Image: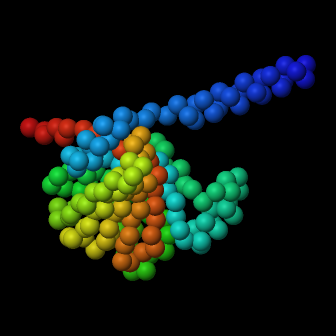
Amino acid sequence: MKKLISIICMLSFLMFFENCSSQSNMDPQAVTALINSQDFSFHAQRANPTNYDVINVMTSMPNAPATRILDLSGSNYSVDVRPDKLEVVLPYFGRVFNPSYGDNSQNSYRFTSKDFTVNKSQNKKGTWIVRIKLNDTNRADEIIMEVTKSGRAFTSIRSNDRQPISYDGYITKNEEQKVLP
């Protein structure tokens, strides 16, 4: 009976790691084409706050994990980069130095920018560094994306009035926007 239980545990352990490693990866040429076209979306899966007040509150909750990572899976948090427009819809967890009282929509990163510059570079290992400098919004100063050859992405946002935050996720091709008659 003990052997049967240990075999079941081993099989479930192997199945768990097989599911973790079988996440969809993109072709490196497709990632390069997306970055060069400047027409892609970053989809956030996890948020990594840097404020220790938020981390202490998170770890003090019952049944909370011991990590400082917030799971955003199943939500539609994204950064849509297009040649003429940038749309950002991301949550924020941390300290805001100039809060807007009564208007909760100002507390997260939800904005559209039409005046921005994109600088791209690739390191020796093939990781793309995409720096987006925003000129027409005061909520965020710069968005930095590190995109691996497999399409995984690490995004950080630097702002003038709040502490930095970073997000883990992946990039995909933008879907065509349908114009309603």
Picture coordinates of residue 23, whole percent (x, y):
49, 34
State the scheme by which the image is colored. Answer: rainbow
Q: Among all residues in the image, which is located at the extreme front?
A: 124
Tally the marks. Answer: 0
For the N terminus, the quadrant is top right
Give the left or right position of residue 12, taking residue 1 as reference.
left
Give the left or right position of residue 75, taking residue 71 as reference.
left
Residue at 50 percent of width and 70 percent of height: 94
* Above or below, comparing residue 113 to residue 10 in the picture: below
Picture coordinates of residue 50, whole percent (x, y):
53, 68
For the C terminus, the quadrant is top left
Residue at 46 percent of width and 42 percent of height: 74
Q: Among all residues in the image, which is located at the extreme bottom?
A: 98
Regarding residue 170, the answer to whether it shows in the image is no
Picture coordinates of residue 149, whole percent (x, y):
39, 43
- Please state which of residues 2 and 146 is positioned toward the viewer in this rendering: 146
Give the left or right position of residue 81, taking residue 148 as reference.
left
* Above or below, comparing residue 41 to residue 109 in the picture: above
- Please state which of residues 84 and 32 is positioned toward the viewer in this rendering: 32
Q: Quadrant of residue 88?
A: bottom left
Residue at 31 percent of width and 47 percent of height: 41
Q: Quadrant of residue 99?
A: bottom left
Q: Quadrant of residue 90?
A: bottom left
* Above or below, comparing residue 133 to residue 18 in the picture: below
Residue at 38 percent of width and 78 percent of height: 161
* Above or below, comparing residue 32 to residue 52 in the picture: above
Give the left or right position of residue 67, taking residue 31 as reference.
right
Regarding residue 25, the answer to whether it shows in the image is yes
- Please state which of residues 33 and 38 is positioned toward the viewer in this rendering: 33
Q: Among all residues in the image, which is located at the extreme left?
A: 181
Picture coordinates of residue 49, whole percent (x, y):
52, 64
